[in-house]
Image: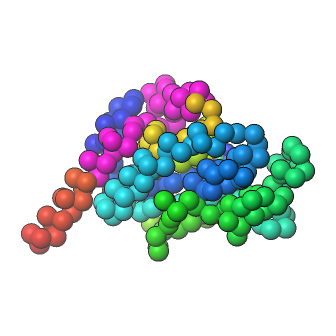
């Protein structure tokens, strides 16, 4: 199944593909969380929600393995380096009390995935302390054990956690497709350039396309699977 993409079509095998939705958490997308504490306009990420929902629905419909990630730390912050915590005003730092609970801390309301993209039963949620989803997590083991070699990536933010994860995945030999409009950044320019970087130099980090190009192909996979079942 070929998904139209840049720099060229992405040859997708649904049985070997996972959709990885990066950090679509209240802490990044809603006021009062980590993103806002860093001085960002969180409304800039809202445009990614509806495309990510469409992509998630299409992936689930095609039987594609779905994985969610969340950035955050243990309540005692023992997994958070000082270099990450000790920045900015003390009442705005990781671990400080905010309107959605302690900022970027596991188990707090702000750490949750937004309701629009809530994980279904059986969809792994990877809690990660860093920007990359492979760093200090069992993501790679889960993917390898399931025979996954291709990733469709989306989430926030494009140039930070999506990009870091993509680079980690690319170095590990995964074929990566980024769903551009299902990603978001507090910096529109960084979003654009981050996507350009992925597909430059013949696709040095992977492929880029939009959700409208992915969904009909996944729907076709679903139809094909259904007709095979009926005929057999
Ligand atoms: C950031 C992320 N931007 N999920 N995290 O700190 O991109």
Tally of numbered tags = 0
Can the viewer see residue 232 in this picture? yes
Query: Above or below — where is 137 with respect to 206?
Result: below
- State the image quarter where residue 107 is shown: bottom right
Frontmost residue, 216 versus 44: 44
Q: Please provide percent x and percent y for residue 141.
A: 56, 64
Residue for point 16% across, 70% down: 229
Residue for point 45% across, 66% down: 146
- Its colouring scheme is rainbow
Q: Judge from the rendering whether residue 105 lies leftward or rightward of residue 121; answer left or right.
A: right
Q: Please provide percent x and percent y for residue 16.
A: 38, 57
Split into 4 quadrants, where in the image is the C terminus? bottom left
- State the image quarter where residue 209 is shown: top left
- State the image quarter where residue 228 is shown: bottom left
Residue for point 22% across, 52% down: 220
Frontmost residue, 155 versus 67: 155
Q: Judge from the rendering whether residue 156 lies leftward or rightward of residue 75; answer left or right.
A: left
Predominant SS along the magenta part: helix
Q: Please provide percent x and percent y for residue 42.
A: 64, 43
Query: Above or below — where is 99 with respect to 10?
Result: below
Residue for point 61% across, 56% down: 25
Q: Does the magenta segment cover residue 191?
A: yes
Q: Does the magenta segment cover residue 54?
A: no
**Which residue appears farthest toward the left when viewing the image?**
231
Can the viewer see residue 171 in this picture? no
Frontmost residue, 19 versus 171: 19
Q: Judge from the rendering whether residue 36 lies leftward or rightward of residue 12; answer left or right.
A: right
Q: Which residues are magenta?
A: 189-218
Frontmost residue, 214 versus 151: 214
Q: Please provide percent x and percent y for residue 50.
A: 43, 49
Query: Above or below — where is 159 with respect to 59?
Result: above
């Amino acid at each position: 199944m070929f998904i139209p993409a840049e720099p060229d079509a992405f040859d997708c095998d649904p049985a070997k593909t996972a959709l990885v939705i990066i950090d679509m958490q209240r802490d990044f997308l809603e006021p009062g969380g980590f993103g806002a504490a860093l001085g960002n306009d969180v409304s800039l990420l809202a445009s990614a929600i509806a495309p990510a929902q469409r992509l998630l629905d299409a992936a689930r419909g095609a039987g594609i393995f779905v994985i969610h990630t969340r950035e955050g730390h243990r309540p005692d912050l023992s997994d958070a380096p000082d270099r990450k915590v000790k920045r900015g005003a003390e009442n705005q730092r990781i671990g400080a009390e905010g309107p959605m609970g302690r900022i970027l801390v596991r188990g707090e309301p702000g750490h949750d995935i937004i309701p629009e993209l809530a994980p279904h039963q059986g969809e792994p949620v990877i809690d990660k302390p860093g920007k990359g989803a492979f760093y200090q997590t069992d993501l790679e083991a889960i993917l390898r054990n399931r025979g996954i070699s291709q990733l469709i990536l989306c989430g926030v933010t494009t140039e930070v956690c999506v990009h870091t994860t993509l680079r980690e995945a690319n170095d590990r030999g995964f074929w990566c497709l980024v769903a551009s409009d299902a990603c978001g950044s507090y910096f529109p320019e960084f979003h654009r350039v981050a996507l350009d970087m992925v597909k430059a130099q013949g696709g040095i980090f992977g492929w880029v396309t939009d959700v409208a190009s992915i969904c009909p192909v996944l729907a076709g996979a679903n139809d094909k699977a259904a007709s095979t079942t009926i005929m057999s």
